[in-house]
Amino acid sequence: MKGLNPKYNIKTIGGLNSMAHPAPGFKENPDHKVEISPLNGNLEIRAKGIKVATTAKALSVKESGLPEVFYIPLCDVNQQVLLESKTTSYCPFKGRANYWSIQANGKNITDAAWEYKDPYEECITLKEHVAFYSSKVDMTRG
């Protein structure tokens, strides 16, 4: 993936003040890490038996104090099963998250996924990627 640092660790990036859209969380918590790297192999997401996404271009995000999360390019997600939610949340390291529900086999899985549409510069590689709650979908790595 062009421009992707295989081990993105904000502690190695200098000059936060020179960024136009820096994450405020790192200023207050300089030891906090968000490591973004390509995930080796394929990843498939299913919900209620319906294939929601399959990709060989997933990103692995390892963040201080949180379990590993996989982000999938939006272009590899079946857009027909996603319903934009009104739910949002905020992360001082990544930015504002917008949520998606999944419509699969007549069932609605509320807020099953999220996306950072305008992430902070330190996590810009998450733009146009979506992550799914492992408790709401089935994930298979291959």
Image (spheres, rainbow, N blue to C red):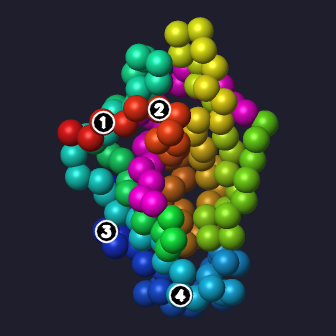
Q: Residue at x 21, y 46 (%)?
A: 41
**Tag 1 or tag 4, which sits nearer the N-term?**
4
Instruction: Specify start and end residues of the magenta stretch as a single range.
Output: 67-85
**Tag 4 or tag 2, which sits nearer the N-term?**
4
**Separation of disc 3 and disc 1 at Cα?**
22 Å
Pointer 2 local density, CA inside 10 Å: few below 14, some 14–19, many at least 20: many
Specify the amino acid type for callout 2. Answer: Val
Q: Is residue 84 magenta?
A: yes
The reply, left or right, for residue 126 in relation to residue 60 is right
Give the label on residue 31, or none.
4
Pointer 4 local density, CA inside 10 Å: few below 14, some 14–19, many at least 20: few
**Separation of disc 2 and disc 4 at Cα?**
32 Å
Specify the amino acid type for callout 3. Answer: Pro
Check the picture and name the quadrant holding the N terminus. bottom left
In depth, the one of 133 and 96 nearer the eye is: 133
**Separation of disc 3 and disc 4 at Cα?**
19 Å
Give the label on residue 50, or none.
none
Q: Secondary structure at mark 1?
A: strand
Q: Could you tell me if residue 2 is visible in this image? A: no
Residue bearing mark 3 = 6
**Tag 1 or tag 3, which sits nearer the N-term?**
3
In depth, the one of 40 and 67 nearer the eye is: 67
Asked which quadrant contains residue 94, the reply is bottom right
Residue bearing mark 2 = 137
Estimate the x, y position of residue 29 in percent, counting from the top left.
Answer: 63, 85
Q: Secondary structure at mark 2?
A: loop
The reply, left or right, for residue 133 in relation to residue 99 is left
Specify the amino acid type for callout 4. Answer: Asp
**Separation of disc 2 and disc 3 at Cα?**
27 Å
Q: Secondary structure at mark 3?
A: loop
The reply, left or right, for residue 29 in relation to residue 57 is right
